[in-house]
C-alpha cells in the first residue's frame, strides 16, 4: 500500500499533474494494454466454429403444421455435435403494411427456440406465424468442447395473407 494514494480520491491527487483529463487518458491506456494482453495471452488459440448454412427442406408452405429446416449439406464443420435453432418476428421496414406507430419487432426476441442434434431437422410449428408478418430463422452449431458458432445468415420470409 502506498499511503499517499490510500483513501477516497487520493489516487488522483498523488501527482500534482493529475486532473480529470489525465486520469481519463490513464484509464484508456490501461484498457488498451489489458485488451492487447487478453487477445495475445488468453485468446491466441481461439478459433470460432464457422456459422452453419441453413436451408428449408421443402418450399415454405405456411398452411402446413410445421416448417422444416436443415443444415445445408457440406456446410457443417466435422466436429459439430448440436445445433440451436430459433424463429423470430421482425418489423420489415420495406413492407407497405408496416405501422410506424406500433412498437417494432426485433430479432433478439425469439418466438421459438430448440436445440437439436446436428442431423435432426428443425420443425418449426406454424402456430407461431401470423398472416402478413415477417420472420427470420437462424441456427448456430456447437462442437464437442461446448463452443458455439456465431448465428447463421437468416432465412427470411413473410407469411402471405390467407
Image: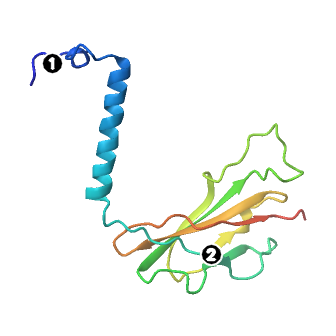
Within the image, what quadrant is residue 139 found in?
bottom right
Q: Residue at x 59, y 75 (%)?
A: 53
Q: Residue furthest bottom?
A: 74
Residue 82 in the image: above or below residue 132? below
Tag 1 secondary structure:
loop
Where does residue 146 sit, x and y in percent of width and height? 37, 68
Residue that mark 2 sits on:
54
- The structure's colour scheme is rainbow
Q: Where is residue 160 in the image (x, y as percent from the top left)?
A: 86, 65
**Residue 128: quadrant of the picture:** bottom right
Q: Which residue corresponds to the image point at 13% horizontal and 15% vertical from the top-left?
A: 4
> Which residue is under mark 1?
6
Alpha-carbon span between mark 2 and mark 1: 58 Å
Residue 128: tell me if it is visible: no
Q: Position of residue 116 (x, y in %)?
A: 51, 74
Q: Residues within 10 Å of mark 1 (few under 14, many from 20)?
A: few
The image's mark for residue 115 is none
Assign the N terminus to one quadrant of the image: top left
Residue located at (85% from left, 53% from top): 95
Amino acid at each position: 500500500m502506498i499511503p499517499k494514494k490510500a483513501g477516497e480520491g487520493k489516487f488522483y491527487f498523488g501527482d500534482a499533474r493529475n486532473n480529470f483529463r489525465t486520469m481519463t487518458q490513464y484509464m484508456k491506456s490501461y484498457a488498451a494494454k489489458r485488451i492487447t494482453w487478453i487477445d495475445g495471452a488468453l485468446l491466441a488459440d481461439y478459433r470460432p466454429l464457422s456459422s452453419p448454412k441453413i436451408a428449408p427442406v421443402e418450399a415454405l408452405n405456411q398452411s402446413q403444421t410445421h416448417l422444416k429446416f436443415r443444415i445445408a449439406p457440406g456446410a457443417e464443420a466435422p466436429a459439430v455435435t448440436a445445433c440451436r435453432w430459433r424463429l423470430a418476428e421482425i418489423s420489415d421496414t420495406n413492407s407497405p403494411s408496416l405501422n410506424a406507430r406500433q412498437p417494432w419487432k426485433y430479432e433478439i426476441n425469439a418466438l421459438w427456440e430448440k436445440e437439436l442434434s446436428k442431423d435432426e431437422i428443425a420443425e418449426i410449428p406454424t402456430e407461431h406465424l401470423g398472416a402478413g408478418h415477417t420472420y427470420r430463422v437462424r441456427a448456430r452449431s456447437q462442437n464437442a468442447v461446448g463452443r458455439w458458432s456465431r448465428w447463421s445468415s437468416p432465412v427470411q420470409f413473410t407469411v402471405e395473407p390467407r
